[in-house]
Amino acid sequence: MNYRHSFHAGNSADVVKHSLLIALVRALQQKPGALTLIDTHAGCGLYDLGGEQARRTGEAAQGVARAFADPNPMLEDYRAVVRAVNVGTEPRLYPGSPRFLQQLLRPQDVLILNEKHPEDVDALRRVMRGTPAAVHERDAYELWLAMVPTRTGRGMVVVDPPYEQTDERARITDTLTAAHRKWAHGVTMIWYPLKDRVTHQRWKGNLRKLGIPKFMSVEHRLYDADQPGLYNGAGLFIVNPPYVFVQALPPLMEALRIALAPEGHRGKITAEWLDNRGWA
């Protein structure tokens, strides 16, 4: 799967991912102690929705545009972050995860960004100039393992790869296993596409076997049944989600489902614990 994000910025997966990212960081920030926020695959940081690549796919029309058209107040935090990088009422620019995280920073928090693609890291440095973010150009999985446990003690790692490499899932599994041994209480959020159901179920089964406690997945499917050859949705694996986040998740998921459902479909968004604790 080739996933240069400039083609997909602002799509439905971004709306779900960034809405949950805001909720997760805000839940962690209910405690006053400093957080270290690490983005292993940071991308460019900012995307032009009017650019040739975004217009070629038109995916933002089914994502951020729907979120802006829906009046549900549950999505207002998401809309506020997008508005902050735009002039006018309609979003012309879309912030990547680095800009979402940067807008959520408190004075005591630390932001570490990493991007390996040479063109993208140059763009990321330009976009993040003047912010407190530290920008690295390293292998994402090497950086992930090197940065934990964080110096602040508390923190979160965001893993959002393009899934261009055939061993991407294996590298995530291996790195998560090693990172959890070093930093068992750390929070990790891993994005993934939902396209090949068999491959995904096999990977989820392998992750379940790791025996990591407090390990959940949230999955959003656009259509009521899989559409062969099409992008059907995306999900997030979350390790150690705070209790406040878990309790607030159901109404946010429902708001996202309603806002993003394509014409003629209800869509579906679900959450489950991979450690078999059941859903509270």
Image (tube, grey):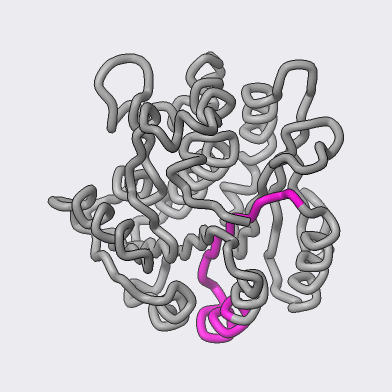
Question: Is residue 183 shown in magenta?
Answer: yes
In the rendered image, is residue 149 in sight?
no
Q: Where does residue 105 sit, x and y in percent of width and height? A: 30, 50
Looking at the image, the residue that sits furthest to the left is 130
Lateral position of residue 9 relative to residue 50, left or right: right
Task: Specify the quadrant of the image occupied by residue 150.
Answer: bottom left
Seen at 72% across and 49% down, the residue is: 194
Seen at 70% across and 74% down, the residue is: 212
Q: Nearer the viewer, residue 229 or 162?
A: 229
Lateral position of residue 113 relative to residue 224, left or right: left
Q: Which residues are magenta?
A: 175-195
Task: Specify the quadrant of the image occupied by residue 121.
Answer: bottom left
Q: Nearer the viewer, residue 179 or 141?
A: 141
Seen at 76% across and 29% down, the residue is: 267
Q: In the figure, 128 relative to 225: above or below? A: below
Seen at 79% across and 17% down, the residue is: 264
Question: Is residue 188 shown in magenta?
Answer: yes
Q: In the figure, 36 relative to 86: above or below? A: below
Q: Where does residue 134 sit, x and y in percent of width and height? A: 24, 65
Q: Where does residue 16 sit, x and y in percent of width and height? A: 58, 39
Task: Specify the quadrant of the image occupied by residue 203.
Answer: bottom right
In the rendered image, is residue 219 in sight?
yes
Q: In the figure, 9 relative to 237: above or below? A: above
Total label count?
Answer: 0
Q: In the figure, 74 relative to 6: above or below? A: above
Q: Where does residue 43 sit, x and y in percent of width and height? A: 39, 55
Q: Report the quarter where the N terminus lies.
A: bottom right
